[in-house]
């Protein structure tokens, strides 16, 4: 079983062979898809006349600041437009996909972050209201497993449900890591637009969990979330985390075969 994280905008950039590759793997071992779509959310937020806001944590992780209105736009774009476009594309290619948000059946539960510590423009630490961002606390693995057992392919958008039943924005990479960890899939694959983790312009092909944690502070924006999510998945018992390029032929099979990608395994 494999959990695959694809970006929302990656859907446009995936290699044409990707869908038939997903179909093959889904038939062989079962696939759970988790998607992102931050760029699309930003685009729609701007179209609606709202300025997207991003914050940086003291450890250097950049994320979207989500107030109530942004949470509603985020839900609309992620669980509406993007999720259904992916389901439509899979259905068209003979994959019986079911689109879910983390809200449905409490697939992804999260605790609302009451306060956020951020680094402001002056480089100083500042405490702000947490808004509608969540830290994942649980995943309804039973529901996901039931859907898989009936022969469907779940497609999950990273909208979580809070204890107060609010829509919460959770990071897509970390949502994939948590789904993989709770459902106990053997592998988690993060599809991106580069071959994997590049350090000094060279592909890092293999990392142990401790090496991945050690180099985390040295990794730039974008990839740091994937490495962090990979370490979280491994700590939850996933055997291996893969980071691979979605713009190559049969990107899923190729990553499973450890072909020109980054493979992170437990020590």
Image: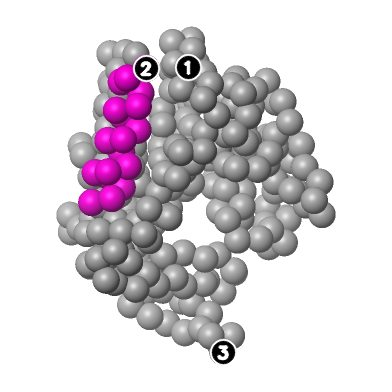
Q: Quadrant of residue 230?
A: top right
Magenta span of residues: 76-93
**Residue receiving disc 2:** 93
- Find the distance from the CA under tag 3 to the CA under tag 2: 51 Å
Q: Is residue 63 above or below residue 179?
A: below
**Residue receiving disc 1:** 20
Earlier residue among tags 3 and 1: 1
**Residue receiving disc 3:** 122
Which residue is depicted at the point 70% across and 26% down?
A: 258
Taking the image as shown, residue 76 lies to the left or right of residue 64, namely: left
**Color scheme of the displayed model:** one colour
> Are the residues tagged 3 and 2 within 8 Å (C-beta)?
no
For the question of whether residue 82 can be seen, the reply is yes
Mark 1 secondary-structure assignment: helix
Mark 2 secondary-structure assignment: loop
Q: Quadrant of residue 193?
A: top right
Q: Is residue 65 above or below residue 2?
A: below
Q: Is residue 236 above or below residue 29?
A: below
**Spot occupied by residue 147 in the image (x, y as percentages of width and height):** 28, 21
Does the segment drawn in magenta span residue 264?
A: no
């Amino acid at each position: 079983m494999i959990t695959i994280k694809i970006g929302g905008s990656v859907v446009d950039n995936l290699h044409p062979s990707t869908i038939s590759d997903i179909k093959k793997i889904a038939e062989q071992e079962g696939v759970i898809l988790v998607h992102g779509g931050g760029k699309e959310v930003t685009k729609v937020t701007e179209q609606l006349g709202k300025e997207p806001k991003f914050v940086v944590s003291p450890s250097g992780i950049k994320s979207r600041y989500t107030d109530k209105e942004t949470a509603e736009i985020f839900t609309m774009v992620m669980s509406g437009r993007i999720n259904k476009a992916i389901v439509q594309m899979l259905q068209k290619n003979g994959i019986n996909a079911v689109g879910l948000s983390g809200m449905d059946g409490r697939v992804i539960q999260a605790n609302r972050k009451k306060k956020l510590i951020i680094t402001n423009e002056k480089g100083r630490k500042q405490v702000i209201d947490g808004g509608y961002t969540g830290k994942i606390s649980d995943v309804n693995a039973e529901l996901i497993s039931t859907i898989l057992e009936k022969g469907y392919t779940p497609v999950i958008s990273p909208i979580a449900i809070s204890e107060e039943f609010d829509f919460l924005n959770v990071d897509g990479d970390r949502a994939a890591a948590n789904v993989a960890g709770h459902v106990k899939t053997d592998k988690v694959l993060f599809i991106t637009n580069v071959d994997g983790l590049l350090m000094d312009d060279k592909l890092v092909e293999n990392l142990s969990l401790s090496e991945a944690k050690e180099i985390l502070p040295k990794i730039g924006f974008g990839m740091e979330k994937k490495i962090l999510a990979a370490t979280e998945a491994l700590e939850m018992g996933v055997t291996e985390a893969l980071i691979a390029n979605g713009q190559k032929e049969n990107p899923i099979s190729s990553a499973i075969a450890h072909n020109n990608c980054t493979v992170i395994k437990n020590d």
